[in-house]
Amino acid sequence: MLNNFVFQSPGDIAFSIFKFPVYYYGIIVSLAILAGYIVAYHLFKKYYDTEKAKYILDFSPFIIILGIIGARLYYCTVNLQYYFRHPVEIFNIRQGGLSIHGMIIIGIISLYIFAKKYDISFKKLADVFLCGSIFAQSIGRWGNFFNSEAFGTPTNLPWKLYISPSHRPVEYLNFEYFHPTFLYESILDFIIFLVLIILFKKMSKIPGRIACLYLILYSAARIVVESCRIDSILNIAGIPIAQIVSLFLITLGIVFLFMIK
């Protein structure tokens, strides 16, 4: 009976409009971004500033666009050899290729700029947007499922993920089932979101601590999940770049947490 719990993607195309394919990945990422914005808006309005919450609607589209650009540039940068040979592919994000680390870095920089422009506390904005981000990440990871990407090592566990031969790395062509690491991270992200929501009322009394906690918890979760993945596009001394960046973000989160305290 347990063997029935097998994940298998139905494909990456949801439907077509005038022969133009609409991908599940794009739909899910769009829904994730919308959900993250709603969370950020309501948290800011509830815990920080009812009047200035309206400004979040003004600059959120720019934050989202810049975040997506940052996510894509980061992904292309760490996979520079491929995109140097295929530069046109840089603009093809419908089938995946967004890095959350790039979105975090550019997103935080963008928040700082808009905080200055609208005279809003940067730490408060970071709290609500990063809390919204982790909720969006828990949803967005399902885009990887439909793209048959971001999976882990081969496994025969009951919750295994079937990957078609066309999506398997060459060295794993003889394996059919893999760890659904997209699911692991989605679950961990949602748990982190719940933790942040529970702590928000208390920790919001000192703005910035929720943002630091996000950096620490998400990065720790990413290090764990990354240890099971086989699709790292860049390794340094045998260590996936995602783990290195995550370790840096954990350090950054701890340092700022003590500075704020």
Image (cartoon, grey):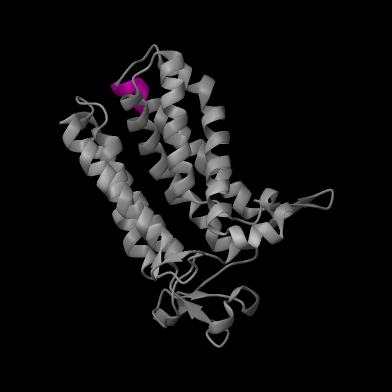
Looking at the rendering, which quadrant does residue 53 occupy?
A: top left
Residue furthest right in the image: 18
User: Residue 45, image x and y in percent?
Assistant: 36, 21
| Viewer-proximal residue among 54 and 93 | 93
Q: Does the magenta portion include 44?
A: yes
Give the residue drawn at x 31%, y 44%.
215
**Quadrant in which the N terminus appears:** bottom left
Q: Does the magenta portion include 163?
A: no
Q: Does residue 37 appear to the left or right of 80 in the view shown? A: left
Q: Does residue 260 appear to the left or right of 44 in the view shown? A: left
Give the residue drawn at x 45%, y 23%.
113
Picture mark count: 0
**Quadrant in which the C terminus appears:** top left
Give the residue drawn at x 53%, y 42%.
70
Looking at the rendering, which quadrant does residue 120 occupy?
A: top left
Vertical relation: 100 (above or below) 123: below
Asked whether residue 196 appears in the rendered view, the answer is yes
Dominant secondary structure of the residues highlighted in magenta in the image: helix
Looking at the rendering, which quadrant does residue 211 occupy?
A: top left
| Viewer-proximal residue among 99 and 137 | 99
User: Residue 143, image x and y in percent?
Assistant: 55, 55
Asked whether residue 194 appears in the rendered view, the answer is no
User: Residue 115, image x and y in percent?
Assistant: 41, 20
Residue furthest bottom in the image: 174
Magenta stretch bounds: 43-47
Q: Does residue 189 appear to the left or right of 260 in the view shown? A: right
User: Residue 173, image x and y in percent?
Assistant: 58, 84
